[in-house]
Image (cartoon, rainbow, N blue to C red):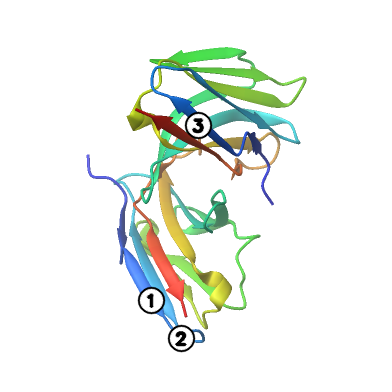
Amino acid sequence: EAGVAQSPRYKIIEKRQSVAFWCNPISGHATLYWYQQILGQGPKLLIQFQNNGVVDDSQLPKDRFSAERLKGVDSTLKIQPAKLEDSAVYLCASSPGLPETQYFGPGTRLLVL
Amino acid sequence: SQQGEEDPQALSIQEGENATMNCSYKTSINNLQWYRQNSGRGLVHLILIRSNEREKHSGRLRVTLDTSKKSSSLLITASRAADTASYFCATEFSGGYQKVTFGTGTKLQVIP
């Protein structure tokens, strides 16, 4: 079974630029999550999708971050414009339904200069 | 905000020794999970314990849960160098929809 795929793996941008991350969850998984993990900290949930709908985006900085999940499968997370404090690893995870076991992708490491 | 707080923040042991890390949380939960993250890699699910369970085993892992103290512990027995990683507890709140919140993590180093 293929795991959660993410791209790109690394991205370096200047502040105020925009960036987009892509995630392809495990086939058949209804729930998809985007996390932000700052160095030395635990993952922080940014947004959770159940199929096409948003279940929780309470910690998503909506003035600069946006996310969508097309047709209940792939998802993109966008930052526009980026700030220095957005430097982090962005993790995508999926689960069959309930979040009892989440399967994580390798993450995208973002550096904002 | 982070629901769980792991203790200690960092732990260094010799190969073959046991490693114990603790997680404390603030609100009632449905279940608690432990994840491992190797350097530069994604998180891997290790074990889940439900709120009505007190202890669970998986290979060299033993997890306990004390809901009265709102705490859990993860014991890794006979540690190996490959166990070197950060370990996170993740709690699923009870009530409302199923939301999982990760703790701050314990960084474990196993010295060969």
Of circles 3 and 1, which is in front?
3
Q: Amino acid at mark 3?
A: Ser
Quick one: SS at disc 2? loop
In space, the residues marked 3 and 2 are separated at their CA atoms by 41 Å
Above or below: residue B46 compared with residue A99: above
- Residue visible at 33% across and 67% down in the picture: A10
Of circles 3 and 2, which is in front?
3
Above or below: residue B59 compared with residue A66: above
Quick one: SS at disc 3? strand
Which is nearer the eye, A87 or B102? A87
Which is nearer the eye, A17 or B81? B81
Find residue B61 and report its horizontal and vertical position in percent: 45, 18
In space, the residues marked 3 and 1 are separated at their CA atoms by 33 Å
Find residue A84 and report its horizontal and vertical position in percent: 55, 76
* Dot 2 and dot 1 within a common chain: yes
| The furthest residue to the bottom | A16
**Which image quadrant is residue A111 in?**
bottom left
**Chain hosting mark 1:** A
Give the labeled residue for mark 1: A12
Of circles 2 and 1, which is in front?
1
**Chain hosting mark 3:** B
Can residue A76 be seen in the rendering of this structure? no
Whether residues under marks 2 and 1 lie with C-beta atoms below 8 angstroms apart, the answer is no
Give the mark nearer the N terminus: 2 vs 1.
Answer: 1
Can residue A73 be seen in the rendering of this structure? yes
Q: Amino acid at mark 2?
A: Gln
Give the labeled residue for mark 2: A17
